[in-house]
Amino acid sequence: MKRLTLSILGLVKGSEQLIERLMFHRRRTLLALFALITLLLGWQASQIRPDASFVKMIPTEHPYVENYLNYRDDLAGLGNSVRVVVAATDGDIFTASFQETLRKVTDELFFLPGVDRSALASIWTPNVRWTEVTEEGFVGGPVIPDDYDGSPAALENLRTNILRSGQVGRLVANDFGSAIVQVPLFDRDPESGAALDYQQLSHLLETLVRQPYESDAVRIHITGFAKVVGDLIDGARDVALFFAVAFGVTLVLLYLYSGSLSGTLIPLGCSLVAVVWQLGLLRLLGYGLDPYSMLVPFLVFAIAVSHGVQVVNTVAQEAAQGADNVLAARRAFRALYIPGLTALLSDGLGFVTLMVIQIQVIQDLAIAASIGVAVIILTNLLLLPLLMSWCGVGARAIARAKRATASTRSAWALLTVFARPRGATVALLVAAGMALAGLQLSTGLKIGDLDSGAPELRKDSRYNLDNAFVTENYSTSSDVFVVMVTTAPEQCSSFATLERVDRLQHYLTNVPGVQSSLSLADVSERVTAGLNEGSLKWRSVSRNQFVINASLAYVPGGLMNTDCSLLPLIMFLDDHKAETLSRVTASVKAFAARHDSDAIQFRLAAGNSGIEAATNEVIGTAQYKMLLMVYGVVSLLCLLTFRSLRTVICIILPLALTSLLCQALMATLGIGVKVATLPVIALGVGIGVDYGIYIYTKLNSFLLQGQSLPDAYLATLRTTGKSVAFTGLTLAIGVVLWVFSPIKFQADMGILLTFMFLWNMLGALILLPALTCVLYRHSGARVRQKETSDLLS
Amino acid sequence: MGFNVQGRFRRLFMLLGISTLSLPGLAADSFATEGFDRLQVPTLVSQRATQSLLLDIDTAGERLVAVGEQGVVLLSDDQGERWRQGAVPVSVLLTAVHFVDAQQGWAVGHDGTVLHSADGGASWSLQLDGNELNTLRVKQLEAELEALRLDAEAAPMVLEALEYALEDARFTQEEGPHMPLLDVWFADSQHGFVLGAYGQLLRTLDGGRSWQTLGHQLPNPDRFHLNSLLATRSGDLYIAGEAGLLLRSRDAGRTWAALESPYDGSFFAMAELDGLYLMGLRGNLFHSPDGEHWQALELDSSATLNNALAVGKTLLLLGQGGLLQAGNRAGFAPLQQPRSRQSLSAAAVAGARLIVVGEGGIQRKDMPQEGAQ
């Protein structure tokens, strides 16, 4: 082990010398190469497209999702549809002008691309009919009377037909204040085979339906997965604005901090180059930008800036000690190559651990972020010192650095109290108290999405308000959980199948959280009663197969497949909280365990809630796996670098406290562990370890010079403390703006990352010296000397 | 390696998690029975049973007993405040219930189910199911035919009709127990009738231990459904059925005669107040002082009438789409505007309250004002 570490360290050291020599002897060639690559990748980056695919956001290897994907074509009628609600702001739908609007909206939607026109339904489509039992049998007709002319009599007729049609609560609101146009979509165009363009559809819904028809008298509400995706892609465009703001703020801060134009523009420029390369490489590898990976450029930029600051800072200090531009740049490179590489490697490896989560958007995020970090090694550890070797930092910055080193009075001295035993003990006790409190609070941490409606968007977003309108005024919930019941072909409507499905439905009414359910069995029961003059006493699945077949002569779309081997059982849930979903899945599994046979299988799960149940299960297990891996990898890297367990503890414990507090914060703010927040911990730990590495490296070098811990720590703070604080600030600025994103999960990520970046900084500045003080108190200076000399041998 | 261990723990936790999750209603014995047929599976105890489809309600002494889908029987001893479920050995849709006193009661339902309770509805035993019913019908008809063939004076038409009925019964037996029973009425703890689809009528003289089929003796050649049985104060029995079928027996059910019907559509219920009321499809309602001369009554609704209940001097009508009207032959008025359009099926009086059952389960309502009409 020891030999291995030594050889690795040797390799790194060797590469450092080799690269340094190459770099500073071939400056122009290198620069030209960088410029060329930037041009090429910039061209690529400019072609990157937004991309939001449903399948990428779900755990495709989870058995539920595998089942869903197997039967996806048969379930098509179920899932993907948009509901356009036309609502009268005053009064009800029985006015000639309202009906005219509804008719026009129906026509408009009929001609939208991607719409399954045969299944489009509103009270104005001929497929929506009323039926009634009379002495002669069934009579019926379209809900809109054939002789409709908008007269009061015709409207009264319409009202009667709607009541008779059973569409109240479905296509017409319970209070008759609005009506729905149900718009089923094709995922792929049946003629051209092209995938549905969600963004285009969402825009057409706005420009052809919402804008023209919304007025003082009429409101339009639109819900459905396609609209969520469209809004997500639109919301993600705001991200570009955030990037501009973050860039501007960083620019100002960096100038205030460095006092040098070149020391501001060069790190910023290099960081921008890193972003361009990252985007260009993503595009080259065939990726698009989804709403998750869209945040990676921010992270890359922030990380790059924070490393750039270290470089500029060191260059200024070297220059202050009299080195010329090239020598200062070379020395800065030499001083920062190893800690920078270690820090960036730990960032990158932290991101790579996200690959254990079997959800493609997270894996894509991991790849995008890892590429970004790898790129930073080139742009900010190589290109940046290279550029600085020409420009230098400027006289003002050098003078500033001189003043800082020379000054005896420093605000940093206050922090050295944590490097003394008493202060250290107090700090650690406080930290322990916080850890306990955090542990207590984080027990309330929930898996999954906790808010109602579309959890991707904000509660007060147009979409979620629209969705709330629908749930309030119609008898359907937007949380749909589907059990796929499979049989041999032609057996989905057999008595044995329907009886069992009927039993499961009855059993499910007893599971808290299940509002109602719907299946072919309900259709059979209702039509059987209908065939017997509407008598409730006949509302049962008949044991007579001929009666069943007669009752299923006309089945609404989506309740069975074409060869009658699949029958979806659709449940409407109160909410999509993790407990609700796990209760439903456990209940169905228990039922399936008793009833599954060669003849019939109850398979989980489709519908948005079914998929979410799968996602929750994946995340619930991946959470601990990922934490273990990310801490394992980061600890191992620190161990390899510093070759002391105690040092690893000094660096890792503050991070662990932050992770714990982050979980407590999530529990307090009601943010669940989900696809969006799971990566935050890996990102937070991966990036947070940078502070520790930089501080500990400096601290060690001063301890090696024989200084006492408080003195060494003060010296560390004077040289690097400011840049550490600045790093925390730039990282926080990069992510804090996400809090304003219209996309809820981006906002959640923003809150949590900002919290982690700032707390990790505080942890590194306060707890790291305190831990060092306590852990090394009994070992004495001799041991410390030995350990530190080991490191540099 | 480490992650394999992690994986194993995960599975362990998942196992633990699932085994400790409480699964209300999945009582272990609910599905433990050999067969999964609804004639063999006991009813599930469900927290939401009061919201089930409930089709009939009756009083057993002070107790209310309601029956409905999936074999659900609900009992209340506090006038409908709280309900609990009776233990029922089947999961079929129960269509009617009738108690003769605080203990003895019968319920009927789909698949030819006849249930008996001797403890006021707390527990039920299966007295007859469709399979037994089919066998019994075939055996009885065979015996009757045998006897008739030995009778030299038997009219050929009667013989032919009986042969036809037997053939029909055998065919039904092959089809399985698919015919629902739709109503039950007992005169006392020994004598009672069950009736239902396709002209089924059975009588017991020994509290349900043995049954005698009467369907083939009725003047009902088309085997129309028998929907409802009414025993009048004068001791007559009426059966109202499909397609305007109206039958009467004046000898406690031994013989039945068809009455002239005022309507071709189906009747679903009869009631007695100031004379007889007969009702059915599309709001058709008739009144008669003697069961023979009927007069149509106007109703401001064309919803099908499912049932009626005489309360004092008022008749309550219950129907599709939430119809609930009170009145008498002078006129009816809605008791309240229906808030939901869920159909109502039956009602019972509990103290000052009215308990109504139907599509949405149990609803409690204020009693109509006496003589308001």
Image (tube, coloured by chain):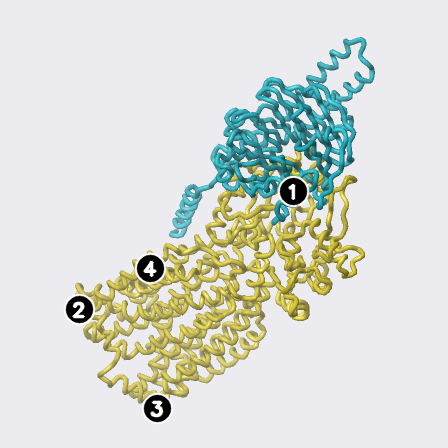
- Crowd tier of the residue under label 1, counting other residues whose Cα lies within 10 Å: few below 14, some 14–19, many 20 or above: some
Q: Which residue is mark 2?
A: A781
| Residue A438, numbered label | 4
The chain drawn in cyan is B
> How many discs mark residues in the rendered view?
4
Q: Are marks 4 and 3 on the same chain?
A: yes
Chain letter of the residue beneath label 4 in the structure image: A
Query: What's the residue type where badge 3 is placed?
Result: Ala
- Crowd tier of the residue under label 4, counting other residues whose Cα lies within 10 Å: few below 14, some 14–19, many 20 or above: many
Write down the colour of chain A. Answer: yellow
| Residue B373, numbered label | 1
As measured in the structure, the alpha-carbon distance from the residue carrying label 2 to the one carrying label 3 is: 40 Å
Q: Nearer the viewer, residue B166 or A86?
A: A86
- Crowd tier of the residue under label 3, counting other residues whose Cα lies within 10 Å: few below 14, some 14–19, many 20 or above: some
As measured in the structure, the alpha-carbon distance from the residue carrying label 1 to the one carrying label 2 is: 104 Å
- Of circles 2 and 3, which is in front? 3
- Residue B142 rendering spot, x and y as whole percentages: 72, 16
User: Could you tell me if residue A608 is visible in this image?
Assistant: yes
Query: What's the residue type where badge 2 is placed?
Result: Ala
As measured in the structure, the alpha-carbon distance from the residue carrying label 1 to the one carrying label 3 is: 104 Å
Secondary structure, mark 3, is helix
As measured in the structure, the alpha-carbon distance from the residue carrying label 4 to the one carrying label 2 is: 35 Å
- Of circles 1 and 2, which is in front? 1
Q: Is residue A24 above or below residue A647?
A: below
Q: Which residue lies at the image location 40% right of the left edge and 45% below the top edge?
A: B12
Q: Which residue is mark 3?
A: A395
Q: Is residue A480 left or right of residue B247?
A: left
Query: What's the residue type where badge 4 is placed?
Result: Gly
